[in-house]
Image (cartoon, rainbow, N blue to C red):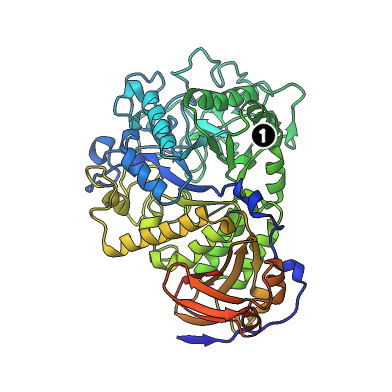
Amino acid sequence: MKKIGIIAFCVALSATVSCMQQTDEEISTMGKPIIYQIFTRVYGNTNDHCTFDGTIQQNGVGKLEDINDAALASIAEMGFTHVWYTGVIRHASTTNYDFMSHPANQNVVKGRAGSPYAICDYYDIDPDLAVDVDNRLEEFKRLVERSHRHGLKVLIDFVPNHVARNYYSDVKPDVSQLGGADDKSVSFSANNNFYYIPGQDFVSPVSDRDTLYIESPAMVSGNDAFTAAPSKDDWYETVKLNYGVDYQNGRQKHFEQRPDTWTKMRDILLYWIEETKIDGFRCDMVEMVPSEFWYWALGNVKTKYPEIIFMAESYNMDLYREYISSGFDLLYDKVNFYDVVRGVTEGKIHAGDITNIWRKTEGIERNMVYFLENHDEQRLASDFFAKRPENGKAAMLLTALMGRGATMVYFGQELGERAMDNEGFSGIDGRTTIFDYWSADAVRRFVGRDHSYIGKELNAEEFDLRNWYKSVLNLAHSSIAFDYGAMFDLMYVNTDTYDKGQQLYAFMRYTDTERYLVITNFASESTEATIRIPQHAWELMKVDPNSALVLSDVFGTEVVTSTVAKLTEEGVTMSIGAYNGVVLKIK
């Protein structure tokens, strides 16, 4: 165990506090979203003998009905407030059903199950998820109702940038079909729903399948690949939607008359709200759609349904404030929070750089979504990231407790799911596949064959990890200090972490009546750390300088008595495990 002495130096005090002061009365009217993302197809699948590249008959698939009252009770007791059901809208797959008038071609489907972001009918529920396919919408409505009964708000995906190459709405044939009135003789028209490559036929990069796929003229792929022959690395299974931007001529915008695509996509949002009573949308790849559309569409929706939540998949920090202005409530803070905290966890970035995270989003921190996993990112416990679930505890403490915005957890993260299977199209990449029919090992053992969701087959370490997540998330959800209290960054008075290369990060969260000190250790070995709290922090927290104080370990049994003067001059010394942290409540 290393011993670290931490000393002070002077910098501008204004740089230490990340958000303005608020009273407890103001804070209590707000709520910190704690979001649980469920990849619906995998979540309830209890097949423990999945085969590589298996069909739905071989490997099975999770159903909407699998997410029963027991499942939802277990989610709510963890402290979650929202559930994002990923992949519920019908998307292209190699599994066909009798009702499909335009079944998918295997040359333009990734994996057997297909990507949930290759939507083939915006108005339909994916039939794979239904027990009774003919009543799949009713099954989803019942899931929404069950979720609401357990106090959980429901989010689903809105995928506005691209659709599957076989897109056709069987559910709403009376609605003008996307591309149905397009002029395919031109590459671009503001009246078209798609972009075209006239005179060229589409060539799939998948050459080892026999079924012929014909698309003439070729349409532009979803990742703005203006070629008739996209590569395997392109989004070749999708086609780009046209919002009136002429990409091949300087990205000229043709918004003089509202493009037809705008109205169609706005109507899809309204349909899901009105038909299923969901509470919001996670919006895919918002930067690939013009911001003018977001201002118009979100304004339209929120005028009628002001409580609807919009969460943006965002990667460009320069556009954060613009998206908030356009109506987004929450934004992925991937390139800021996730990238830095992952780098610190992996030992590639110094923990002191965490200070820059909140500085970069100061003033909009309540709109940020902090996460360590989602369907795009590698699992925390995988060989590609932290390698062991315990190695992610310090990072998770920051995810849940540092910010005033939302915390998001991917299903199975709380169980240490490693996702090191070779599923098929996805391969061994540390991600739970979104392309294959599969089950997730730790999740499957928690769910149980009887879908009791009590973890009959979990080992002791997995139980302990889930209980630890439960404690952290409930603290984040129930404490007004971690909800919307102010934050005070303690790094500027504790500089040995910089001078000696130590991987510590410490901060405070507080209101007029609640005060917490959080110390995290990103080192690979245990540390004894001394953290000082400057006089300025006590003044902001309105603590009498003559006070006697008790510091209680929220997740342990240690209790420390001290005084304001002692904590200012000498600090508090705590033993912190590798990749772990302590949370001290100050009274």
- Residue 286, position in %: x, y? 61, 40
Q: Nearer the viewer, residue 88 or 121?
A: 88
Query: Type of residue at label 1?
Result: Trp
Q: Confirm whether residue 521 shows in the render.
A: no
Q: Confirm whether residue 222 shows in the render.
A: yes
Dot 1: what SS? helix
Residue 280 position by quadrant = top right
Q: Is 366 above or below relative to 554?
A: above
Residue 285 position by quadrant = top right
The structure residue drawn at horizontal position 31% and vertical position 65%, both measured from the top left corner, is 461
Residue 587 position by quadrant = bottom right
Q: Nearer the viewer, residue 172 or 181?
A: 172
Residue found at the far top of this picture: 174
The structure residue drawn at horizontal position 49% and vertical position 28%, both measured from the top left corner, is 277
- Residue 558, position in %: x, y? 44, 76
Q: Is residue 181 left or right of residue 537?
A: left
Residue, disc 1? 294
Which quarter of the figure is the N terminus placed in?
bottom left
The structure residue drawn at horizontal position 54% and vertical position 63%, both measured from the top left corner, is 398
Mark 1 surroundings: few (<14), some (14-19) or many (≥20) residues within 10 A? many
- Residue 102, position in %: x, y? 41, 21
- Residue 500, position in %: x, y? 59, 84
Q: Is 476 above or below relative to 198?
A: below
